[in-house]
């Protein structure tokens, strides 16, 4: 299983020299396993990914955590969507199927010059099963409800060679209004995954300001990964105001904390163009 990061930023894209290292594009992750191409979220990072996939003939499975703008806004610039005969399956768990219209409905006047019906690819909404799960040949996808305003889904991909989970826009220990999944349910859902990408947007001192926004404290994400015996945690959905220097510092402190806990969980900071390979639960990391 190969995992490539095309966008790691939360809420809105950023630019400028303060965010060059980790990148400014919003959520987009490519997962390649067997002969399958899966994309998690269509934030602005999906534009570059589309260019990389122009000669790829495989179907695209595009899984959405939810339809907030930072997770869909790159889709109108996803070139494979304009390729005749290309099959793009839109998937989302825990949300009404019709919400997937948001992906195409953003392409209407006065917001965008090309309307959704001018898309040439065969874009369809693929249903999950009645348990919000899905099996694609040897790949089993399970899901869990996000603690986020308006809801959404976390995904776990299980394959004989590797296990990966994508959990973004999720508040651990949230207020009642968005408390869909408890800490213990998260532990069960994420038990022993090889690579976990998890929302880690805020610092402890920011909690009074951000409680109920549906994002996690870095400290809670670390604690969860440790307790769930995750092998490699990737901190994700960076605050647009967070500079490279600040993210470097947070990463260092997170690694030190994990080590002090006696945990074997490796910690990385999501960074555009980073590639992770998982083979029989052995994880290697390099740049694209
Ligand atoms: Zn978001
Ligand atoms: Zn959101």
Image (spheres, grey):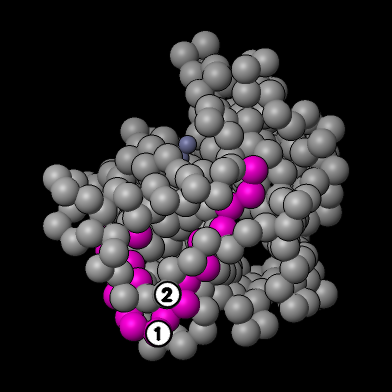
Q: Is residue 65 magenta?
A: no
The numbered dot on residue 85 is 1
Stretch of the chain drawn in magenta: 75-94
Compare marks 2 and 1 and give the one earlier in the sequence.
Answer: 1
Q: Which one is in front, 143 or 30?
A: 143
Disc 1: CA contacts within 10 A as few (<14), some (14-19) or many (>=20) = some
- Marks 2 & 1, CB-CB < 8 Å contact: yes
Relative height, residue 183 to residue 119 (above, below) = above
Q: Residue shown at 64%/43% (left/top)?
A: 94
Image quadrant holding the C terminus, namely bottom left
Report x, y in % for residue 148.
57, 31
Report x, y in % for residue 192.
83, 54
| Mark 1 residue's CB less than 8 Å from ligand 1 | no
Question: Which residue position is annotated with label 2?
Answer: 122
Q: Which one is in front, 224 or 172?
A: 172
Helix, strand or loop status at disc 2? strand
* Residues at marks 2 and 1, CA–CA distance in whole angstroms: 6 Å
Tally of numbered tags:
2
């Amino acid at each position: 299983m190969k995992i490539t990061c095309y966008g790691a930023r939360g809420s809105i894209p950023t630019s400028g020299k303060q965010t060059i290292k980790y990148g400014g594009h919003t959520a987009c992750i490519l997962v390649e396993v067997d002969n399958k191409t899966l994309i998690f979220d269509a934030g602005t990072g999906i534009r570059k990914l589309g260019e990389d996939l122009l000669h790829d003939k495989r179907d695209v499975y595009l899984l959405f955590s939810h339809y907030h703008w930072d997770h869909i806004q790159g889709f109108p610039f996803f070139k494979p969507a304009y390729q005749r005969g290309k099959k793009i399956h839109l998937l989302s768990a825990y949300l009404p199927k019709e919400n997937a219209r948001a992906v195409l409905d953003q392409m209407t006047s006065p917001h965008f010059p090309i309307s959704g019906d001018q898309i040439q690819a065969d874009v369809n909404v693929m249903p999950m099963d009645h348990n919000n799960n899905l099996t694609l040949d040897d790949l089993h996808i399970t899901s869990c409800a996000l603690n986020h305003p308006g809801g959404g889904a976390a995904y776990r991909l299980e394959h004989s060679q590797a296990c990966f989970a994508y959990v973004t826009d999720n508040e651990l220990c949230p207020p009642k209004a968005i408390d869909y999944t408890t800490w213990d349910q998260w532990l069960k859902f994420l038990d022993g995954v090889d690579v976990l990408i998890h929302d880690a947007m805020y610092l402890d001192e920011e909690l009074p300001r951000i409680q109920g926004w549906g994002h996690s404290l870095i400290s809670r994400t670390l604690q969860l990964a440790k307790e769930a015996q995750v092998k490699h945690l990737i901190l994700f959905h960076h605050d647009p105001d967070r500079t490279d220097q600040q993210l470097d510092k947070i990463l260092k402190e997170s690694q030190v904390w994990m080590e002090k806990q006696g945990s074997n969980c490796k910690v990385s900071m999501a960074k555009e163009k980073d590639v992770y390979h998982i083979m029989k639960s052995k994880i290697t990391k390099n740049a694209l």
